[in-house]
Each structure stands twice: as C-alpha cells, then as structure tokens.
Amino acid sequence: ESLCELYKIKMNPGPKGEIKNPKIKSNKVSSKNIHITADDFKNFTKTLEKMMNQHAEERQNFLRLVNTLQEKIFVLENQLNLLKSPQKKWYKFWK
C-alpha cells in the first residue's frame, strides 16, 4: 500500500480481493528516446572505480588518524599515571 501511495498507483480490487488493472498517474514525462552506448557504460564504470579508489584512500587516512589519536590517548594516560601521588607515604619507606 505504501508503494502504491508513493508512486500514486490506484488499484482496483476485484472479487475476493484480487487486484485488476492498476491505474498509474503519470507526471507529464516527456517521451524522448534515450540511447545508451557501451562508451556510456565504460565511462560510468571508470567513474565508479575512481569513487571507490577515493573512498579507499579516505578510509585509510581516517584509520591512520584514529590510530594516531589512540596512541596519543595511551601516552596521556601513562603520563597521568606517573603524575598520580604514590600510594605509600614517603615517611613510611621502612615498611
């Protein structure tokens, strides 16, 4: 039903709920003949390959950035641990 609403399709239910003769409202689509050639597909595949390669590069850059941030967080955590006060008091060194 939602697809029918989306594409503005009117269905005529027949006996026993069967659907007969769907009526489709068209939005004044021009009837131009579009010819697609093999060169169009080649250009399309080249464009898709470029997009995939660019996506792979961006993904690698993002992963490098995340790894760098993780390393910096580990360094900061270690520095915080070193700056914490010792658990024992300095004057209880003989215990």
Image: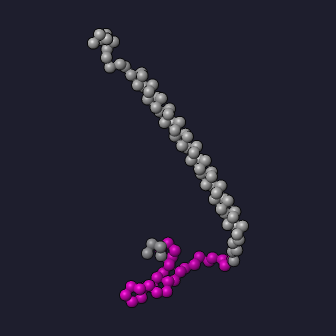
Residue 31 in the magenta stretch? The answer is yes
Place residue 79 in its image quadrant: top left
Name the quarter where the C terminus is drawn: top left
- Return the x and y of residue 13 as percentages of the image width and height: 42, 85
**Would residue 79 be found to the left or right of residue 42 on screen?**
left
**Would residue 20 be found to the left or right of residue 64 on screen?**
left
- The tally of labels here is 0
Magenta region: which residues? 5-32
- Return the x and y of residue 72 as percentages of the image width and height: 50, 32
Q: Residue at x 70, y 69 (%)?
A: 38
* In this view, 32 is above or below 52: below
* In this view, 20 is above or below 26: below
Q: Residue at x 59, y 76 (%)?
A: 27
**Would residue 55 be found to the left or right of residue 88 on screen?**
right
Q: Nearer the viewer, residue 70 or 33?
A: 70
Q: Residue furthest front?
A: 94
The coloring applied to the image is: one colour
Residue 58 in the magenta stretch? The answer is no
* In this view, 16 is above or below 54: below
Q: Residue at x 47, y 33 (%)?
A: 73
Q: Residue furthest bottom?
A: 15
* In this view, 64 is above or below 27: above
Place residue 64 in its image quadrant: top right
Name the quarter where the N terminus is drawn: bottom left
Q: Nearer the viewer, residue 91 or 38?
A: 38
Place residue 46 in its image quadrant: bottom right
- Return the x and y of residue 70 as percentages of the image width and height: 48, 36
Q: Residue at x 55, y 79 (%)?
A: 25
